[in-house]
Image (tube, rainbow, N blue to C red):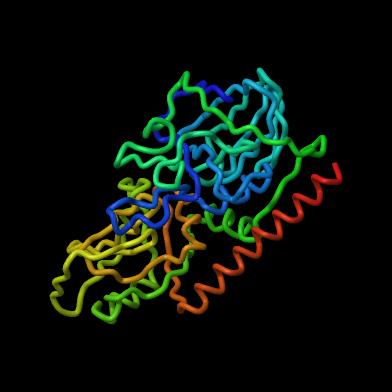
Amino acid sequence: MIEILSNGAPNLVQDAGRQGHLGFGVSRSGAMDALALALGNALTGNDANDAAVEISLFPFRVRFQRDMSFAVTGADCVVRLDDVALPPWWSRTARAGQTLVIERPKRGGRAYLSLAGGIDVEPVMGSRSTDLKGAFGGFEGRGLRRGDVLAVRETAERPLHATGLGVVPAELPAFWQALGEGLVTVHAVAAAEYRHFTEAARQAFTGEAYEITPEANRVGYRLRGPELTLAAPLELLSHGIVPGTVQVPPSGQPIVQLAEANTCGGYPKIATVIETDLWKLAQAPVGCRIRFALVDLDEALERRRARAREIEKFQQTLALMSSRG
C-alpha cells in the first residue's frame, strides 16, 4: 500500500483505458501517455494494462507502507527516494516507511508511478481507469487527495539489480530536443472531411504550426494558428469520434480530442493523430507549438506494429536482466 502525502486532484489512477464502450457514450479514459505507462509496467514486471498513478500536478509525494518495486516514467522529473536522487525511466525497490518525491518536470507534462502488482482498485467496465466526467472508476471516481491510501496487488517480487533497471524509448531523445525548441511534430491520417477544406487550409494544416492554448486537458487540446476554412458550408449529424480526432469548429481553430475524448460530435474532422504519437501531445505543455505531418493508413499501422515490437523487446530484455539478478 502507498499513502498519498500531497493534494492533487489532477493526479489519477489510470490504466490502458476502457475499451469497447464508445458506442454507449463511455469515453476510453486511460493514460494520456500510453508509452510511459506500458514501459513503467514493464519495468515493474506488470501486465501492460495494470493501473498506475498519472501525475500532472507536482510535486507529488507518497509514502510506501510495505516493501515494493516501483518505476517512474514519462516527464523528465527529479525523483527522490528519501534523500537519494534517482534517474528517470528507472525502477527501484522501496522499503516500508520510505518517501518518494517527484518534482515538477524539467521537460514534459505528465509522470507515471507504476508499482509492482499494479494499483488494486475495482474494475469498472473492464478497466481501472478514472473517468472524471462520469465520476467513476479509479479511486472513488476522483483525483487523489492527501491521506488517500492506495492498495497494491500482491505479487512475487522479481529481483532487481542493486542500482535498478531502466529504459530509454527510441523516440525520447529527439522528442526532448524538439520540446526544448518548442516545436513538436505529430503524425496524422486524413479524416473523412479532409477534402472539404480549402486547399489553403490543407496546406496550412501541415505547413504551419499550431500552439497549444490554456484550454487543454484530458478531454482535448484547443489549438491556435492559421484558420482552417471549409470550401463550402457543411452540415453533419453527430457521429463517433476517438482520441486523436482533430475537429474544426466554426472558429477554424482545431481541437485535438484526447484520452477522455467526447464519444460523438458534429464538427468536421480534418485529420486523426495516429495512436503511437498521442503520447507526444500528452507531454507537450501549454504554449508548445504542434506541427502535423500526414501519413497514410499503411504507415500508421506499421508505426503501431513497430511500437508493439519495441515494447515487447523491452519486456523481454528486462525480464532477462531481472532473472540474472
Specify the farthest residue to the right.
324
Task: Tell me the quarter of the picture where residue 2 sits.
Answer: top right
**259 left or right of 67 in image:** left
Q: Is residue 31 left or right of residue 270?
A: right
Q: Position of residue 106 (x, y in %)?
A: 56, 41
Q: Nearer the viewer, residue 122 or 167?
A: 122
Placement of the C terminus among the 4 image quadrants: top right
Image height of 182 relative to 156, above or below = below
In the image shown, does 213 or 235 lie closer to the viewer? 235
Q: Position of residue 1 (x, y in %)?
A: 58, 25
Q: Does residue 156 sit above or below 298 in this rendering?
A: above
The structure residue drawn at horizontal position 68% and vertical position 44%, both measured from the top left corner, is 45
Q: Is residue 55 left or right of residue 213?
A: right
Residue placed at 17% from the left, 70% from the top?
Answer: 236
Identify the residue at image location x=51%, y=23%.
149
Residue 100 place in picture, x, y as percent: 62, 27
Instruction: Answer with left or right where residue 282 lies relative to residue 202.
Output: right
Q: Please state the horizontal and vertical placement of residue 15, each as a whole percent of the image.
A: 50, 45
- Dividing the picture into quadrants, the one containing residue 57 is top left
Residue 152, picture quadrant: top right
Viewer-closest of 7 and 76: 7
Q: Residue at x 23, y 69 (%)?
A: 268
Q: How many marks are shown on the rendered structure?
A: 0
